[in-house]
Image: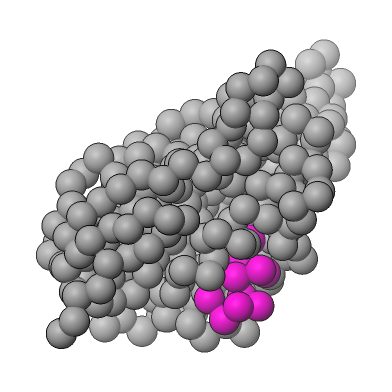
Amino acid sequence: MAVIPFEFEGTIIKPGKRAVVELEIARLPSGTVIHMPVHIFHGKEPGPTVLLSGGLHGDEINGIETVRRIIASKMLNKLKCGTVLALPIINVYGFINFSRDVPDGKDVNRSFPGSAEGSLASLVAYTLTQKILPHIDFGVDFHTGGASRTNYPQIRFDKQDTKARDLATLFKAPFTLYSGIIANSLRASAMELGKPIIVYEGGEALRFSEFAIEEAIRGTKRVLFHYGMIKSNPKPRRQTLFQQSSWVRAEVSGLFSFRKQSGQKVKQGEIIGKINSPHNDYSVKIISPVNGSIIGHNNFPLVHKGDAIFHIAYDELTLENE
Ligand SMILES: [Zn+2]
């Protein structure tokens, strides 16, 4: 079989070799140029080209650490076939500002496909659309919950996207759920090109979750093993797919404490938390509206009326395992 070098932005990577290519985004007001480094691992034999990306939201550190550990683990150095493009930090601006967004307050993941003439978020999105997406066959984009909101390790994919369903089934995260494509997201731009990207969510922003990182790495290994790219294959597990999910919101403002948390099953009518007035004027029980599993919860003890406090998934299916 012919062994073909991989060409990326003028850099030639021979079979069995790796390289780091720095994509220039823009300058900081200080004059410093901001780059988005792309770690490229090219296998010895032909195979799929896979995107592994983190930090599309700059404060979602578990995704950044996941991609960093995958790069450091040496498993990609012995890539048997195919190519991996690993981007630990897409949104460098958010990363250095401890923020989900870029400094103008825009979300890169709502700015696709982007424009060379656009604002910062649009520019970052454009770089991915133009320089990364054309190369890949599929990808996994690693995210976490928001600030003080933790997500139990989960893969999200669009119900209509059969290629993404196959990837989700291979990944075998603790939870898997349907999640429609959001307009102007990375997933939306990739889907238009017929390239499925599944989203991994685990842990919360600005806080490491060893469990979320380890599950992310295990799932990635399962996918790469399936395509013959690496040798190690973590054990399979029973996989639960939730067809629906919704947030339970705070009925009142006050001090929130949870009785059940992410990863736990809940029954309809069960008390899962409480909101107390700091002066004991009221105490409101939070009741689960469905039979399901908590896939995310709020860790912040002060809540306002209407705040999202429990994310509960329900309507379960068991996915076919290989
Ligand atoms: Zn995110």
The location of residue 49, given as percent across then percent down, is 37, 69
Between 74 and 275, the residue placed more toward the observer is 74
Q: Is residue 67 left or right of residue 315?
A: left
66 w.r.t. 13: above or below: above
Q: Quadrant of the rendered structure where residue 42 is?
A: bottom left
Residue drawn at (27%, 67%) of the image = 5
Using the image as rendered, state which of residue 263 and residue 129 is in the foreground: 129
Q: Quadrant of the C terminus?
A: bottom left
Is residue 197 something that shows in the picture? Answer: yes
Along the horizontal axis of the image, is 106 left or right of 127? right
Classify 199 as above or below 70.
below
Q: Residue at x 86, y 36 (%)?
A: 305
Expressed as whole percent of the image width and height from the top left, the position of residue 73 reads: 21, 44
Q: Is residue 192 magenta?
A: yes
Q: Residue furthest front?
A: 10
Our reading of the magenta stretch's main secondary structure is: helix
Reply above or below: 236 against 38: below
- What percent of the width, then of the height, locates residue 75? 18, 53
The residue lying at 86 percent from left, 21 percent from top is 281
Q: Which residues are magenta?
A: 186-195
Within the magenta stretch, is there residue 4?
no
Q: Position of residue 102 (x, y in %)?
A: 71, 35
Residue pictured at 28% horizontal, 58% vertical: 13
Query: 204 or 192: nearer the eye?
Result: 192
Q: Is residue 263 visible?
A: no
